[in-house]
Amino acid sequence: MRARYRESTLFLYALGASLLAFVANSVKSLILPSLINGILGFALGSKKIPQKLLAALLVLNAWGAFINGLYFHNVGDEIVSIQAVTIRSGAVESFLILTLRFFLIVGSTLLMLGLVNVRDLIRSLERDLRVPSGIAFSIAYAFRLFPLLSKDLSEIRIARKERGFTSVVLSPKHLRSILLPMLNISYERAVWGGISAELRGLRLRKVSGRKPLGLGDVIILSALALQWVISLYS
Amino acid sequence: MRSAGYRVGEAVLRETGFDGGEGELILVGGASGSGKTTLLLTISGILSSLLGGWVDGSVFIGGEDLLRGDSPASRLVGLVLQDPEKQVLMPTPLDEVLFTLENLGFDESEALTRATELLRSFGLFDKKLDHVETLSGGEKRRLSLASAISHKPYLVMLDEPTASMDPWGIREVRRFVTDLIKEGKTVLIVEHKIKYFLDMADKLVLLSSGRKVSEYSRNELASRDLLKKLRGAGLDVEPVHEMPESPGCKERRIGEVILTVEGLECWHERKKPLLKDVSFELRRGEVLALVGPNGSGKTTLLKTIAGFHKGYSGEIVFRGGVRKAFYVSQTPDYMFLENSVEGELRLAASKTGRSFEVVTGKVPFYEERKHYPPYRLSLGQRRWLTLVIAWAHKPDIILMDEPTAGLDLSLLNSLFEHVRGLSEGGVSFIISTHDPRVLLGLADRSLVIEGGRVKELEPCKAALMLESIAGVY
């Protein structure tokens, strides 16, 4: 028998797992939930999100985590020394914590995306959690944008190369030259997306009735609770 | 409409009024910045309800004022935005059509039946559960048309529906409009390439600086003198074969061969080549137009020549000291990496060794707009800026992807002038386009992509071919 679940329960799961990523602050407490969500999420969700975008996010995160560890947490025992750069245990630990957090947040989000249809998610958020339609729509619209972000990123990389930037992001200035056009283009797209939604009656939207809690919901929420318990007591 | 605007005290529209009956097509024409899109946003209620603007006036449908009545515009009006990318909100075609119907309170099973029927009639039934990003440009346009009429509105409005459309797409839009008129809908089209709809229009309303300056009936629109006058007002009114001063295919002195493409095959998936056996040469100072339907491989060919598309076999050889070509995307915003026009030009000068003063000298609107974010410039100005950035990098070849999409006649002429100036200075261009005006006014030669293969056709003939496919020749 297939366990039925509300789409909003998966949303709560992703939200709860992301919250856990911020609450847990050691490698030990993060490793299990991060691995579970990372592996399941990337396996299920990568069909819906372009793999290039995921790879780019992964690289950006790894680079950011490395720089952060090196500049702000490079204390403790020496682990390795490469020419003038000495990497200490604090930097490695900080790098691992940030990377595990990334896997937990992205993995749980991908897990949700892999299992729900966006229109059903909007309906479930409105119907079961009483989320205002504008907010439910914004969450759902973000998922439509992922493939577009991937396309934007690829076009911006071409423009950067044409304009004499290296393809490797070496400094905050380089990072800015990627983020600035991405944000500006996304902003314009969001304005027109809002206009399109308004034109198509989002304001009038009314969803009635509630889907009863099923066995699937209990399993999903229990899995989340279990991860919190393991994380907090490890 | 006595007045309307985005900010209190700043009217964008003034003294603009007209009416339309059932089964009528109203064309609204005007140059860029004349208030055409604002008019659509006002009629649909978006200006006042979403964008925080104000309206002093009324919009009546069947005796009910849309801006004040109980029936919101979204029930009675369907709007097709200029860019389907910005209109499509849901991840699959089925979700997209159902979204409108669910919002408007249609019963679930009725909504599903209606959405399925619509997708079938728009040729999207087999792709109803595919991700919208796997659809071609033409399919996305069809989806935007389907979702705009799913709730059977009385008034259907289209914002520059031919802006980035190939002639095959234009023919589809024309058929869509014809069907709506037959069904008795009122259709309002905002467009500066009005030649594509003149034969169907019952009325033309001309806007200038946000004000209605004239209105012409179907009979008046048949007059040649009027068409001449409209052309003077910046509207694209005459199909290629009717243009009185067609420059024809002029012979121009061009230089030596600087690019040879030989036996090129391009693909996204190795087993399905998009382009096969493509061979051509480009000479110094030459303007070569690349014509073909959306998805035929024009952009891929440009990116391959520029070195950004790696899935290819065959030879691309630069000669005469040329090392590479500069690719300018169809969407100018991708090119901007700074937050002001001044910043963009400083970056271009510093990366290329050109003098900042020389670079700014190429931008006629520099003093007026130097502190503006480039994204806030008009489309024509943004395209101009990308061309100046490309020029600053001293390329011998500039590859331009659909550079005239969304430009009115005056901006188009400015762009042509700029390209001609550069080509006379020895810069060569390969321009991917569906625009017959590029073929007639700019191109020295043209290549047509058909079934993955490329053949050369005189620019005049290629322009006539495009107009013929669009259904106006």
Image (cartoon, grey):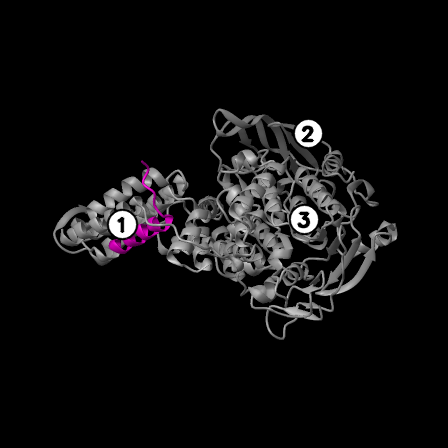
Check residue A22 in the rendering and tell me which mark sits there, or answer none. Answer: none
Between B407 and A120, the one lying in front of the other is A120
Chain ID, mark 3 = B
The residue under the point 53% across, 46% down is B98
Magenta span: predominant SS is helix
Up the image or down, A51 lies above or below B22; here it is: above
Amino acid type, callout 1:
Leu
Gap in angstroms between the C-alphas marked 2 and 1:
64 Å
For the residues beneath circles 2 and 1, the answer to whether they share a chain is no
Query: On residue A221, which mark appears?
Result: 1
Residue where numbered disc 2 is placed = B456
Q: Is residue B286 visible?
A: no
Label 2 and label 3: CA atoms lie apart by 25 Å
Q: Amino acid at mark 3?
A: Gly
Q: Which residues are the magenta region?
A: A1-21
In the picture, the quarter occupied by the C terminus of chain B is top right
Q: Is residue A43 magenta?
A: no
